C-alpha cells in the first residue's frame, strides 16, 4: 500500500480567514484542531503496524470471519482462566 499526500499538510494553519481581517479565537481553534487531526492521520498512515492492521481488516476473508462470529461463543474471564488452568496440567 502506498500513501500519497496532495497539497501542503500545513495549508490550514496558513489559510486566510474569509470576510475578516483578523482570525477569531474560534476559527484559530478550529484550524488548530484540523491541523492536529491531519498530523495524527498522516502519522497513523505512515505507521507500519497500523498499515498491516488496516490491510488485515480490509481483507474480504477477515470481514467474512467477523460476520460469522456470534455472541454464543463469548466466554467470561473466570471461565477462560479455569479452562486455561485445566489445559495447563
Image: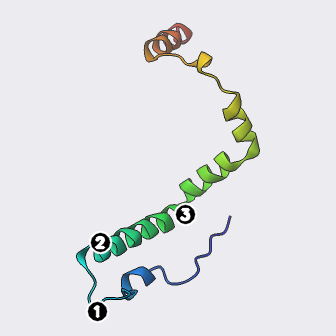
Q: Residues within 10 Å of mark 2 (few under 14, many from 20)?
A: few
Q: Is residue 82 above or below residue 58?
A: above
Q: Is residue 65 above or below residue 14?
A: above
In front of the other: label 3 or label 2?
2
Label annotation for residue 70: none
Q: Secondary structure at mark 3?
A: helix
Please state which of residues 20 and 28 is positioned toward the viewer in this rendering: 20
Please state which of residues 81 and 53 is positioned toward the viewer in this rendering: 53
| Gap between marks 1 and 2 measured at Cα | 17 Å
Residue at the (69%, 32%) spot, across then down: 67
Q: Secondary structure at mark 2?
A: helix
Q: Are marks 3 and 2 in contact (CB under 8 Å)?
A: no
First in sequence: mark 3 or mark 2?
A: 2
Q: Is residue 68 left or right of residue 42?
A: right
Q: Is residue 49 above or below residue 83?
A: below
Residue, disc 2: 29
Q: Is residue 61 left or right of residue 50?
A: right
Q: Secondary structure at mark 1?
A: loop
Q: Are marks 1 and 2 in contact (CB under 8 Å)?
A: no
| Gap between marks 3 and 2 measured at Cα | 24 Å
| Gap between marks 1 and 3 measured at Cα | 36 Å
Residue at the (35%, 68%) spot, across then down: 33
Label annotation for residue 21: 1
Q: Residues within 10 Å of mark 3 (few under 14, many from 20)?
A: some
Q: Hey, which residue is sitting farthest bottom in the picture?
A: 21
Q: Is residue 60 above or below residue 39?
A: above
Residue at the (36%, 86%) spot, across then down: 17
First in sequence: mark 1 or mark 2?
A: 1
Q: Quadrant of the N terminus?
A: bottom right
Residue 88 is situated, as x and y percent measured from the top left of the image, at 53, 12
Residue, disc 3: 45
Q: Hey, which residue is sitting farthest left in the picture?
A: 25
Amino acid at each position: 500500500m502506498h500513501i500519497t499526500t496532495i497539497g501542503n499538510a500545513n495549508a490550514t494553519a496558513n489559510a486566510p480567514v474569509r470576510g475578516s481581517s483578523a482570525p477569531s479565537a474560534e476559527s484559530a481553534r478550529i484550524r488548530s484542531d484540523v491541523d492536529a487531526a491531519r498530523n495524527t492521520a498522516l502519522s497513523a498512515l505512515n505507521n507500519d503496524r497500523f498499515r498491516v492492521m488496516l490491510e488485515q481488516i480490509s481483507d474480504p476473508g477477515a470481514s467474512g470471519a467477523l460476520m460469522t462470529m456470534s455472541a454464543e461463543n463469548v466466554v467470561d474471564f473466570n471461565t477462560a482462566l479455569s479452562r486455561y488452568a485445566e489445559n495447563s496440567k
